[in-house]
Every structure is written in C-alpha cells, then in structure tokens.
Image: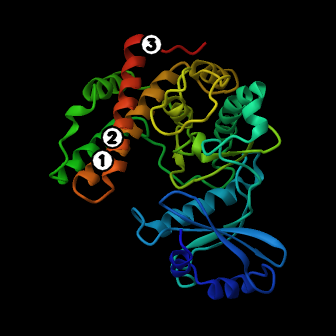
Amino acid sequence: MSEEAWQSLVDLDALRQWMDGQSLGHGALEAVTPLAGGTQNVLLRFVRDGRAYVLRRSPAHPRGDGNATNRREARVLGALASTNVPHPQLIAACSDTDVIGAAFYLMETIDGFNATVALPARHASDAAIRGRMGFALVDGALALSRVDHIAVGLADFGKSDGFLERQVSRWHALLESYHDYKEWPGPSAIPGIDVVANWLTENRPKLLQPGILHGDYHLANVMYRPDSAELAAIVDWELCTIGDPLLDMGWIMATWPDEHGHTTSEIGISPWNDFPRIEELMSHYAANSSRDCSQLPWYGVLACYKLGLILEGTYARACAGLAAPATGERLHRSCIKLFQRALGWIERGIVVR
C-alpha cells in the first residue's frame, strides 16, 4: 500500500490524540509502516514512546459492514486474552467511526513469520521442525475449540442453533446469487456440485457441540515462531463466529497440500517434504480432542464446498468486469480443485485412525 493510500485512511494526528485520551504513550507516532494483510483490512505498524503497535481497520471499500467486522474482531481478541490460544494481544479498540473514519483497534506486534511467504533457513533445513509445524497448526485449532465461549463473554457472538443444518442451503444460495452477473457461465464447470451437496445433506452429523469457530483457518492465517515450530499467533479473525469448531479442522483438510505438495489453492510452502499428511493431521486432532471426531471427513467435504463456492464468487465478478480477470481465473481453478478433492473423499473415503 502506498503512503498516500494509507494516509487517506488513517489520520495520524487524530489517532495520536485518541491515544492520548487512552493513556497510550506520549509524543509522535514514529516508523509508520504498512503491513501486508489481504484486501479486507488495513494494517499499520508504528512506534510510540518506545512501544510498538499494529493498527487494524477496514479498507476504503470493504465487503459488507467493515466497521461491524472490525468491532467483532476486537471483541474476539479481547475475549481470548485469558486463554492459551496464540493470538495478537488486544491493546485498545475504538468503535467510534469519527476518530479516523472507521472503527479500529490496536494490538501488539507478533514476532513471527508467515510460512506461505517463505520459510526461514532454520525451518527450511530441518525436517523435524517442518513435521512439527503441521501438528502445531492443528494444536492451534484444538486450543481454540477448547475455549468456553460463554465463560469468555461470547455467548451471543453467533447462532449455533441449526448451524450444521443451514450450511448447504446457505452456500447454495450464495452460488445462485452469482447468476446476477450475466456474464458468468454458471456452475456447469464445477465438478460434482450436486453430488457433494447431496452427500453433505444425507450424511450431516446429528449433534453439534458449539464453540468458537475461526472460520478461515489455514496456513496463511497463522504466524510461526522464528525460534521453533510452534505457532506465534492465529491472525485474521474477521470470519470468527460461534458454530462447530470441527469445521476449522475441516478447513485445514480442504486447504492442506497433499503428499506431493499439490494444493487446492495457493496456500503452499517450499520445501514441502516432511510435512505431515492430511490423514496424520486428522488423527492428531481426533486423539487430542474431547469432541466426537468420527465424522471428521464430513467437515473436510463441507469446507471444500463452502470455500469453493466463496472463491467462485470472485470469478463471477471477474466475468462481469468487477474483479481482475487473472484473479478470477485463478480462484475458479481453486474452486474446481476443491470440489475434486471433495469428490475424491466421497468416492474413495478418508478415514480417521
């Protein structure tokens, strides 16, 4: 992001005055630097009075209500403060849009790296570290699944009643909405779309133990410690809700590269050798969870279905000239790969051992 772009979204003088009122240091905001953070948020790192901060706010043109999303993220991070879930520590939040033009929050910086960008030399050269990194990702999902959402103040954060029952219909309705883009060729190129939907409906788990669901849990949304294979923090909480935490493990299953390093998206790491296989990650989750994991494959298929249909939306918008064509084509290919993975599991089976 250019300096001109972020300066139009974050008034540093207004931010400084607000921080004065919160007793968050004194003096100027120094070393202001934009951070990479996807398209649905703006991240700025800066230093004040010797303390480093990261500011997060919605972009100029967010999907949906960016302010509401930001407030929810801040609430989640605040609720997790008393838990062992690795996450960015919340410093302060501002729900008022009058300060910098949007709701925002400040969090601690994270000493870590995103493995999908590049592995540090230590991790790239040590097979044991790479093997542990996969299980550490699962352990992060397990830690989140164990949090009592009522005890940490998130009882009203989402609607868990009927969560599983409404999944297929909800995402099918999203797919149908893409017909509003007349140039979109339709779902005919998506393999087995009805087969997957019918299988999910017919094999839906009967019971749900509600908990906190990150909602987009994969390699690109965690940071690893530079000195070990463990997680430094789980990031990007904008899709967090109360639902079935087993779906976070399903998301790992949907996005995890296979034993050859082939991915359903661009969520990959190099070198890939010595990382655990999907089946090993599933077994690790099941062995360390108090939840009924006998239908864990169902959650992997659901994650493929849900993520695939979300990605297809960018392709539909690209067909209508509302998104970059290259991006649309790339995400359409990912949608197809996700459905191919789901069909493979349905046809050949995938077993939790």
> In which quarter of the view is residue 57 placed?
bottom right
Task: Give the CA distance from mark 3 to mark 1.
Answer: 30 Å
Measured Cα–Cα span from mark 1 to mark 2: 6 Å
Kind of element beneath mark 3: loop
Q: Amino acid at mark 2?
A: His
Q: Amino acid at mark 3?
A: Gly
In this view, the residue in front, 105 or 163, is: 105
Residue 225 visible in the current orientation: yes
30 versus 319 height, above or below: below
| Residue underneath mark 1 | 315
Residue depicted at 51% across the width and 68% down the height: 58
Amino acid at the residue labelled 1: Tyr
Residue, disc 2: 332
Pointer 3: what residue? 349
Of badges 3 and 1, the one in the foreground is 1
Asked which secondary structure carries label 1, the reply is: helix
Would residue 131 appear left or right of 278 to someone viewing this image? right
Residue at horizontal 22 percent and vertical 45 percent from the top: 176
Quarter of the picture containing the C terminus is top right
